[in-house]
């Protein structure tokens, strides 16, 4: 069984990661979302092991100590993280696993699983990013400024990723990402068995 | 002007490199064949600078001495080689340059231009390769054996390439190569200007 790809997609807020990833799923049959662990309470209808692995704070902190997260973050009072073991199981099983995570998390994944495919989504321009954030209509002048500043800082870290995809239109971004996945599957390091078969 | 890609395609004889490259050209508008230099005499209709750069043996050997070839080989009494300067000019001009060369030449290119895109074509199986070589109908039993042995030795060196494309059908091989080129164009190292534009 050929191992799946670990695909890491990040992008500043407002870049449209969520829409792009949702559309990518429809087209990539072997792609599976990684299920995150969290310490927040389940909302109505959420199922343990499907939406999240729901853990106690103590359990989560134990797992951090034991290095059992590929990446984790604390958002307000709750932890969120990607259990390393679960990801490795799915990859071994031939599934491609998608992590849609922030830049800090991705930098950690680069250290732990450098064979992953690291893709950074960029907005077509800062003006367009501003327009998209404003379009949500939920921002005050001050919070908009703050979000744009945070977006710039995140974008600067995008240079550490292997691939850059500009999210001009969702269709173009998805087809770019699919080309990246196709090319990554053709890498020699992922196809050692070809040589064994031909060498017989 | 964004620099073009240097694309190096190799494969054991009988793998179908020529057919795949010809079909690739029809679909990749920016792709240009590199023009080789040679010391053999022009055949009827061949134009200097189009089919080949026709050079004297002395001139060719001077250029070898001066390190002016990206790769070169001596086949029987004639030299063949890729002039480094011409390739660099075309890349700078935004053209993608394709080198369809043998493994020894490609290993040299890897040293001189490691940013190139190195693709190795594999036959679907050794049985199929044998069938294809036989299909030409020009081989004696002994020369067939010799060619298959040489092909095996070449294929073993394919592990040094970045990408492996199995030439099962020409269409599939061409679409694989096009995905590789698309992905390579999305590499962060080839898109530094994105960050400059967004950072303004």
Image: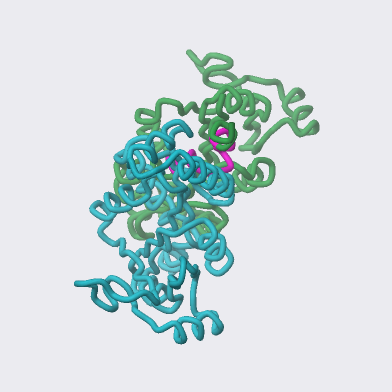
Chain colours: A green, B cyan
- Which x, y percent locates residue A152? 49, 59
- Which x, y percent locates residue B188? 49, 58
Q: Which residues are magenta?
A: A181-194
- Which x, y percent locates residue B73? 49, 68
- Along the viewing direction, whichever of A50 and B92 lies nearer the viewer: B92
Can see residue A136? no
In which quadrant is the C terminus of chain A drawn? Answer: top right
Q: Which residue shows up at 51% across the image and 37% down it?
A: A100
Badge count = 0
Can see residue A167? yes
The stretch drawn in magenta includes residue A188: yes
Residue located farthest toward the left when viewing the structure as drawn: B45
In this picture, residue A71 sits left or right of residue B135: right
Q: Which residue shows up at 44% across the image and 42% down it?
A: B165
- Which quadrant of the view contains residue B50? bottom left
- Which x, y percent locates residue B130? 43, 36
In this picture, residue A67 sits left or right of residue B91: right
- Which quadrant of the view contains residue B197? bottom left
- Along the viewing direction, whichever of A48 and A189 lies nearer the viewer: A189
In this picture, residue B199 sits left or right of residue A134: right
Q: Which residue shows up at 63% across the image and 48% down it?
A: A107
């Amino acid at each position: 069984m050929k191992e799946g790809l670990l695909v890491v997609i990040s992008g500043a807020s407002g870049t449209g990661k969520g829409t792009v990833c949702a559309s990518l799923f429809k087209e990539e049959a072997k792609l599976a979302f990684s299920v995150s662990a969290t310490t927040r309470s389940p909302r109505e209808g959420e199922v343990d092991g499907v939406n999240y692995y729901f853990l106690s704070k103590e359990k989560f902190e134990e797992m951090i100590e034991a290095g059992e997260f590929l990446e984790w973050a604390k958002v307000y009072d709750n932890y969120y993280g990607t259990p390393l073991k679960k990801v490795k199981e799915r990859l071994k099983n031939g599934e491609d696993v998608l992590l849609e995570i922030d830049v800090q998390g991705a930098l950690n994944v680069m250290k732990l699983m450098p064979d992953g495919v690291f893709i950074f989504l960029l907005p077509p321009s800062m003006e367009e990013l501003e327009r998209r954030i404003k379009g949500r209509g939920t921002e005050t002048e001050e919070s908009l400024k703050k979000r744009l500043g945070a977006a710039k800082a995140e974008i600067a870290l995008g240079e550490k990723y292997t691939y850059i995809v500009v999210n001009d239109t969702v269709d173009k971004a998805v087809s770019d990402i699919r080309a990246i996945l196709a090319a990554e599957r053709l890498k020699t390091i992922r196809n050692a068995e070809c040589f064994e078969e031909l060498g017989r």
